[in-house]
Amino acid sequence: MHINKGVIWVKWDFLSVAIIVLGAYLYVRLLQAEEKKEVKLNDFQIRAQKYVKSGQFAKAEEEILKDLKRNNPSNFAHNYYALGIIYYNQKKHKEALHALKKAWLADRENYDAIFLIGRIYHDMYQDVANPDFLEKSVYYFERTLEVNPCHIQALFGLGAVHFDWQNIDKAAECYRRILDAFPENANATYNFGACCLGRENYEMAISYYKKALVLNVDDQQFAEYHIGYCYQCLEDFERAKKWYTFSLENGCKSAKEKLNELKARKTAGN
């Protein structure tokens, strides 16, 4: 089975991480607020928040560290989580893990902190291919889902690992859970199609890939490529050619090889 791009992770960029920090401020403060009364951020946290929004992570770190020096236990979960996010953006994996684990220790319900620990271990695995890091990422994704069963990023992460391990049924279960909660999620639709392809259920894979295209999935050229591949497996070579052509036009260079393969097959009279 030829897989060019199997499954899609949720894309993270600096802006999305900054938004997560803002959400963490509100999340932790809400948990700490008795009777759901509003609790205002202190001056250090407000300044750190502004620095994060503008991408000035070093200055945001300074403000959080100043607040931690005040040794206020009610701020530990909040501040260590924010610090972990800041270090993550600076690619300081060791420091980020240390801070996030302290955040988790201070608040066992902070599922975003647990998830990010898993995400960092997965990033580290991609850098050095240490299987221990991958095992740890799975552990933390699973812990995340124990706290929040619908945590979409953890389901994407766990699904991606199981897919890479060829645990197709487990991967499909993760993406099915996302689709049960968010039926119009384009990347989960694509990934479920990849699982169908992994099971060699080509017709079902085509239907999910086509739906993913309608939903404007990331990297549409790979969905088109896989549709072409599925049609090729079904020996519908004209449709395979059409979809490979779409994929190539949209930037998937591997589609050129498949088109040449179909051309050679036709020339040989097969």
Image (cartoon, rainbow, N blue to C red):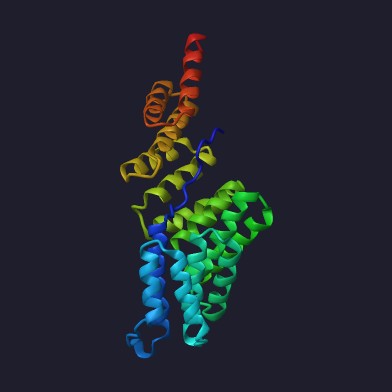
Image location of residue 45, percent across then percent down: 40, 77
Which residue lies at the image location 59% right of the left edge and 50% below the top edge? 126
Image location of residue 225, percent across then percent down: 44, 32
Which residue lies at the image location 47% right of the left edge and 30% below the top edge? 229
Which residue lies at the image location 51% right of the left edge and 62% below the top edge? 88
Q: Nearer the viewer, residue 209 or 253?
A: 253
Furthest residue in direction bottom, as rendered: 34
Image location of residue 81, percent across then percent down: 49, 72
Residue 234 appears anywhere in the view: no
Q: Is residue 258 left or right of residue 23?
A: right
Q: How many marks?
A: 0
Q: Nearer the viewer, residue 104 or 220?
A: 104
Q: Is residue 229 above or below residue 88?
A: above
Image location of residue 106, percent across then percent down: 54, 81
Residue 57 appears anywhere in the view: yes
Q: Nearer the viewer, residue 32 or 242?
A: 32
Q: Is residue 5 above or below residue 131?
A: above
Image quadrant of residue 213? top left
Q: Is residue 256 left or right of residue 215?
A: right
Q: Is residue 268 above or below residue 254?
A: above
Image quadrant of residue 55? bottom left
| Quadrant placement of the N terminus | top right
Q: Is residue 97 left or right of residue 56?
A: right
